């Protein structure tokens, strides 16, 4: 795993922890919590996309190195 991919994984892990924390107390949400929920889920999805792109770039580089 490349350093970029590792950094993205750490970032996504932190986002996942925030998602879990918010989900655990969903019955107590304020309007701010709802906004935070939507934002962190958007960020999590964006980070996941970045990870997919980084993996694809790694695969291209590995293939190029093999030829």
Image: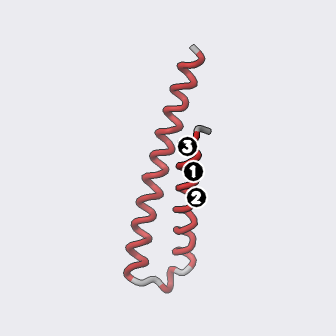
Dot 1, crowdedness within 10 Å: few (<14), some or many (≥20)?
some
Q: Check the image and report above or below for 50 versus 27.
A: above
Asked which colour scheme the image uses, the reply is secondary structure
Q: Which residue is mark 1?
A: 9
Q: Nearer the viewer, residue 13 or 23?
A: 13
Instruction: Give the numbered dot on residue 5.
Output: 3
Q: Residue at x 53, y 55 (%)?
A: 11
Name the disc covering residue 13, or none: 2
Instruction: Tell me, yes or no, whether the two marked residues, 1 and 2, touch with CB atoms within 8 Å.
Output: yes
At 56% from the left and 61% from the top, the residue drawn is 14
Residue ID at (53%, 74%): 23
How crowded pointer 2 is (Cα within 10 Å; few <14, some 14-19, many 20+) is rated as: few
User: Residue 27 location, x and y as percent?
Assistant: 50, 84
Task: Give whichever of discs 3 and 2 has the lower sequence position.
Answer: 3
Q: State left or right for residue 50 relative to residue 10.
A: left
Mark 1 → mark 2, Cα distance in angstroms? 6 Å
Q: Secondary structure at mark 2?
A: helix
6 or 50: which is nearer to us?
Answer: 6
Q: Marks 1 and 3, Cα distance to the nearest angstrom?
A: 6 Å
- Quadrant location of the C terminus? top right
**Residue under the image location 49 percent in, 50 percent down:** 48
Task: Answer whether labels 1 and 3 touch (C-beta < 8 Å).
Answer: yes
Task: Please provide percent x and percent y for residue 9.
Answer: 57, 50
- Describe the element under mark 1 as helix, strand or loop: helix
63 on left or right of 38: right
- Please provide percent x and percent y for residue 62: 57, 25
Q: Regarding mark 3 in the picture, which secondary structure is present there?
A: helix
Quarter holding residue 1: top right
Residue furthest to the right in view is 1
- Dot 3: within a 10 Å radius of its alpha carbon, few (fewer than 14), some, or many (20 or more) residues? some
């Amino acid at each position: 795993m490349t350093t970029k991919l590792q950094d993205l994984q750490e970032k996504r892990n932190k986002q996942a922890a925030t998602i879990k924390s918010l989900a655990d107390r969903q019955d107590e949400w304020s309007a701010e919590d709802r906004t935070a929920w939507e934002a962190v889920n958007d960020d999590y999805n964006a980070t996941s996309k970045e990870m997919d792109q980084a993996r694809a770039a790694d695969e291209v580089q590995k293939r190029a190195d093999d030829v």
